[in-house]
Image (cartoon, rainbow, N blue to C red):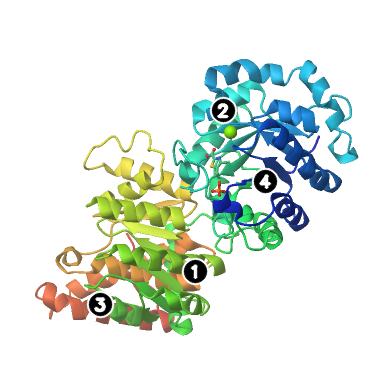
Amino acid sequence: MHVDYSVYLVTDNTPAILGDHDLVEVVRAAVEGGVTIVQLRDKTSDTAEQIRIAKALHAVTKPANVPLLINDRVDVALAAGVEGVHIGQDDIGKPTLQHHLPSLKSPKLEQGFEPMCCSPNLTRESDCDAIIGVTANSLEEAEIAAKGGADYLGVGTVFATLTKENTKSIIGTSGVQHILSSLAQSAPEIKTVCIGGINAKNCQRVLHQTAAAEKSLDGVAVVSAIMAAKDPKKAASDLRQLVATPPPFATSISAPALSHEDIVRKIPELVKRLASKKPLCHNMTNLVVQNFAANVALAVGASPIMSNNSMEASDLASFGGSLVINMGTTTPEMRTHHLNTIAAYNSVGGPILLDPVGAGATQQRREGVAALMRGGYFDVIKGNEGEIRTVSGATGFKQHGVDSGASNLNLDDRVKLVKSIAAKERNVILMTGEVDVISDGKRTFKISNGHSYLGEITGSGCTLGTTIASLLAIEREDKLLAAVTGILMYEIAAERAAKKESVKGPGSFVPAFIDELYAIRQESAAENGEWAKGAK
Ligand code: 3NM
Ligand code: MG
């Protein structure tokens, strides 16, 4: 039996979700909109009522060849003659599940389900059997269910959700990846959907990022995104469309190797392109660096706008530029503005650089980083060692080996960590330091340019973010190349400025530095790329 798991609707009859809508009518609309599989999840009705509802839903799903499953209640499934059951971990407990799953899949029960498989598309030629799904909130649960013979797993809870009480753990996209990677070895055939807080805004990102694992998800399972929607048919068809297409920020390049010569040749071209295009670089940045960041953006050839107001985010995102989210001096009120602005840029594929300033320093900031990481996709995340380690912690699953608690990682471990986060997030991670480490998960560079004066002035990290974001605006395919160009332009300008006779210390360094950024831009525009030979 071929089952399409791509948009999996789980019903909910609680007033908070369903409102005054009729359950059967919502499911009818969702099926018309294109959901591919439906589960009746009803924690309140008695058996007779559940059977009645199941039959009414089946009358809607069956003609559309959409399988209907019943949550927990094998008896209801059998009585209503539907296509299968979904079993939650909380329902019958782990040992029981381990014991019963094989017998649920046994010929005896398949016999019981046989009459259900009467629609031509749902009939397996010879061994007609029911679909059995199991909830997996952890790797251990996933492995047990897979061994027991489940057809598919509902993997979650991905994001915090108000729909299900007592969710055990929020595992994030990296938790999903972790489970998928393990199943790729132990149960490559098993199907998987993710569940928990999935909606139109995040489904493409979740599918995209989890596809970095050895095994990909087969679909997304949602409750409120459809059941609580004003227009469930449109919500379903939007989701169907979204899961079938890559997100706007996905790139198509296959990470071409970059030699030192390639870089020296390509980066002045990029700086020239930046100067000729003058893209918008939208900064949501801290109070300290507003002015400096705007001047740096101008010097490198971008057009800065400093706006912390998410009400204008979708207008700004439509101008084709890039966004810097800098968390220095952030406030709880800013979080909503950040999340809304991130959503606006993600929805059009506008590149975003996240600068998690001071991320590990306070509980507020750790929570802030975690909320932003859950809320959107960042093309580049840039920070010092502590900040990047906080980012890796915020993604849910702990790194193995590298985050053993040591306060200073050696270079090899820094490379390992940066590479693994980039591979998991499917983005570019830059860890700054005496040696900057940058990776897109496949290609990794160590860069030793820069000058100690950068550590003596305020905002040098923040404005490096602005520089990289400016380049991302004009180079959307090879984001690693854009970021490397930004670092080298920035750090080589610092080296040149520090050598000037007029520069006596940090105070005189700042204007000289802005001058050198400008000079590098002018040289690049005049096709003089000599400066790039200073790349170390
Ligand atoms: N199971 P929504 S989370 C039914 O983690 C269910 O196992 C979960 O609802 C799990 O799509 C969940 O509205 C509710 O967030 C998902
Ligand atoms: Mg259950």
Residue 356 location in percent, x, y?
A: 31, 58
SS state under label 2: helix
Estimate the spatial distance between the alpha carbons at disc 2 and disc 1, rounded to whole Å: 41 Å
In the rendered structure, which amino acid carries the disc numbered 2?
A: Asp
Residue hosting label 4: 8
Estimate the spatial distance between the alpha carbons at disc 2 and disc 4, rounded to whole Å: 20 Å
Q: Can you tell which of label 1 and label 3 is closer to the viewer?
A: 1
Estimate the spatial distance between the alpha carbons at disc 4 and disc 3, rounded to whole Å: 49 Å
Picture quarter with ligand 2: top right
Residue 122 location in percent, x, y?
A: 84, 37
In the rendered structure, which amino acid carries the disc numbered 4?
A: Tyr
Residue 411 location in percent, x, y?
A: 29, 44
Ligand 2 closer than 8 Å to label 2 CB: yes
**Can you say whether 96 is above or below 480 in the image?**
above
- Mark 3: give few (<14), some (14-19) or many (20+) Cα within 10 Å: some
Indicate which disc, 2 or 4, sits on the residue closer to the N terminus.
4
SS state under label 4: strand
Q: Can you tell which of label 3 and label 2 is closer to the viewer?
A: 2
The residue drawn where x is 42% and y is 54% is 373
Q: Can you tell which of label 2 and label 4 is closer to the viewer?
A: 2
In the rendered structure, which amino acid carries the disc numbered 3?
A: Phe
Q: Which of the numbered marks, if any, corresponds to residue 292?
A: 3
Residue 532 seen in the current view: no
Residue hosting label 1: 345
- Mark 1: give few (<14), some (14-19) or many (20+) Cα within 10 Å: many
SS state under label 3: helix
Indicate which disc, 2 or 1, sits on the residue closer to the N terminus.
2
In the rendered structure, which amino acid carries the disc numbered 1?
A: Tyr
